[in-house]
Image (tube, helix red, strand yellow):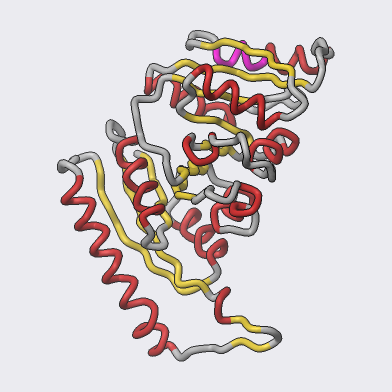
Amino acid sequence: MKNVLLPTDFSENSWNAIEYAIKFFENKTCNFYVLHVNTLDNLIVGDTAYIPTQQEIENIYINPSKLKLRKILKRISDTFKTNKNHKFYTLTDYSFIIESIRKHVDEKRIDIIVMGTKGASGLKEYIIGSNAGDVITKVKCTTLIVPENAKYKQLKELAFPTDFSMSYDIQTLQPISELVQSKHAYLRVLHITKKNAILNMEQESNKEILEDFFDGIDLSFHYLTNNKVEDAIQCFVESRDIDIIVMVAKNLNYFQHILFHSRVEKISYHTLIPFLVLHE
């Protein structure tokens, strides 16, 4: 049983993520929790904050949100065939977004958050400081980020960028193994360096840990040389027709380069390819 949290702001962007999640977990038994947070952030102006009454909160924020959430459930029902393995619940909150998501992750024992993001202006300009950026950096829960133009297709190729600079524990790597096996996909471990360099002893050891853990699945290692990590990722995504990029949040070096770069001219993977972000 998977417990999946689906934050929504009622945009088509967030609907795309909901649609992706339902198809992604088509063959899994899931509880889907569709969450809308009426954020407190917008009420704080300067040094003062307007505090509405409980009745105002209900009338202005909560009740309209519940109505919109019911419309989402109807849209789900109209769009997808009935799946006995899928159950849907709605949640509405009046809080700060990160606090609300953390609360529901804990209370509902959420296994994964699936949320959309719009990358038209580039991930650095949009994600950092945005809801998606805050979630993947501040909420310790596996998160699948679905870009605006990403459409679900049968997963065949997963890219796992790493610099082999750190080892990952079994609990962190397990979601990758489960995904690859359940989708009968290929796992492509990608190492990018700025210049040709052999792995040091620590890197070799960490590489061997990955080889041992992923023994028995379709695994390959790829090495690229490029001064720009994001350019190398773009090239690899295009040449291998990658379906999902898997990241580990604690690997900040790669994590920041791949997700939070500021160059957008030649970079399109952030609007097309979902990111699965894992936390320890």
Compared with 235, 53 (above or below) is below
Main SS class of the magenta portion in the image: helix
Q: Would residue 95 be counted in the magenta stretch? A: no
Determine the residue positioned at 67% across, 15% down. 209
The question of residue 211 being in magenta is answered with yes
User: How many numbered discs, if any?
Assistant: 0
Is 250 on the left-hand or right-hand side of 105? Answer: right
Q: Is residue 171 left or right of residue 107?
A: right
| Res 267 quadrant in image | top right
Decide: is 35 above or below 142.
below
Q: Is residue 224 above or below residue 237?
A: above
Q: Residue at x 27, y 52 (%)?
A: 88
Residue 191 pos. (x, y %): 69, 19
Compared across the picture, whether 235 is left or right of 156 comes to right
Left or right of residue 77, residue 58 in this image: right
In the picture, the quarter occupied by the C terminus is top right
Q: Nearer the viewer, residue 106 or 186?
A: 186
Locate the N terminus and report the quarter of the image it occupies. Answer: top left
Given the current orientation, which residue lies at the most extreme front position? 265
Front-most of residues 61 and 105? 61
Q: Measuring 25% from the left and 48% from the top, which residue is drawn there?
A: 87
List x then y, in percent, for residue 135.
Answer: 57, 53
Q: Is 56 in front, or is 131?
A: 131
Residue at figure coordinates x 68%, y 25% from the top left: 162
Q: Quadrant of residue 215?
A: top right
Q: Position of residue 256 (x, y in %)?
A: 70, 41
Stretch in magenta: 209-214
Against 275, residue 166 (above or below) is above
